Image (spheres, grey):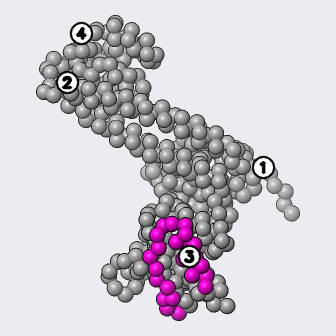
Amino acid sequence: MTAIWAGIDAGRTHHHCVVIDGTGKRLLSRRVANDETELLKLLVDVLALGDEVTWGIDLADGGAALMIDLLLNHGQHTLYIPGRAVSRASEGYRGEGKTDAKDAAIIADQARIRRDLQPLRPGDELVAEIKVHTGHRRDLADDRTRVINRLHNHLTSIFPALDRALDLTNTGPLILLTGYQTPAAIRRTGARRLETWLRKRKVRGAAQLAEKALAAAESQHTSVTGEKPTAQLVHTLAKEVMRLNEQIAETDKLIEARFREHKHAEVIASMPGIGALLGAEFLAATGGDMTAFDSPDRLAGFAGVAPAPRDSGKISGNLHRPRRYSRRLQRVFYTSALISIRCCDESRRFYDRKRAEGKRHTQAVLALARRRVNVLWALLRDGRCYESIPPVTNAA
């Protein structure tokens, strides 16, 4: 039986494929369009070169999604090799140049010699949908942050006192800015009329907000150059933030509904500090299949909450943060650990104990996140929900 290895350097419009045999000899090197017909032709040609093919690819989604689905649908053994791993491995190969063909050859050779690469599995349609929605929500949140920063910059340029007084992450101040952006306009309106205007738009704490705005207006009587067009831009940006808030709220409802449909939703949500959104992020990052992680240590390493050793010579016990991990999954465990400190007595006691041992706040939270990885992995393995007092098991 002839074994061969095919490496794919994936791109948005084109992929490059290199096939090698057991000695590392190149059997095929081809650039193909990211098109189903072309990819199927490549698949047929590669299968004709050997009896047993192992594929390696440097992307797990995005532009490589079509290629991956074609391979998995045809029962091909496919390994995922992160781009960072390919970049580091390239230092051990001859030549300093970088081409798609060279990267594809490195991917094929790494698939041939390494035994620790993660195989790609057919995706769960529900998890795939959750992944799409959570990714879209993250994009919306990033867009909102950018718009809020621009809103701060423009408001500060004409009315710095009001910018300091308002929290633009809340709806009330945004509604205020859709009607009033300058000190003169707020002074002309007055506190009582401004409060009435805010109440008609169902703003909570309308009286306090009106008082803050009027106090800021009384502190500035100078009209800044370019105030009128900037004020109009502030109005537009405030509207944009409110629109993004509505889209994020609608997406949150959709994510929660899809998350509740997953078979592990009840188990994941039973963990203190993990709600529907963080639970959906967990499913999107892991695929919801714990068979990919044969131990909690493997899951902790993937989540970036397990320190990596850096020993040399007589120096031992030197630990540092890992460089290769899922930042998305780390955020889930770190954020949920922060929340659990406030809502779970066991988590609070563990955090306080680590602080008493001299650890900094971040170190204590990471230690708690590491402990919670063990708990969640065991719960998903056993298919049971979290209990503050673990069940008693009888010895055999």
Residue type beneath disc 4: Arg
Tell me if 370 is positioned left or right of 162 in this view: right
Which mark lies nearer to you, 1 or 4?
4
Q: Earlier in the sequence, mark 3 or mark 1?
A: 3
Residue 25 part of the magenta segment: yes
Which mark lies nearer to you, 2 or 1?
2
Question: Which residue was labeled with disc 2?
Answer: 228
Question: Which residue was labeled with disc 4?
Answer: 188
Question: Which residue was labeled with disc 3?
Answer: 41
The quarter of the picture where the C terminus appears is: bottom right
Percent position (x, y) of residue 94? 37, 87
Which residue is pictured at 58% across the width and 36% down the height?
253
Label 3 close to label 4 by CB (< 8 Å):
no
Badge 3 density bin: few <14, some 14–19, many ≥20, Cα 10 Å: few
Which residue is pictured at 64% across the width and 74% down the height?
76
The residue lying toward the viewer, choosing from 70 and 79, is: 70
Q: CA distance from mark 1 to mark 4?
A: 67 Å
Percent position (x, y) of residue 390? 74, 49
Which residue is pictured at 68% across the width and 64% down the height?
291
Q: Secondary structure at mark 3?
A: helix
Q: Secondary structure at mark 4?
A: helix
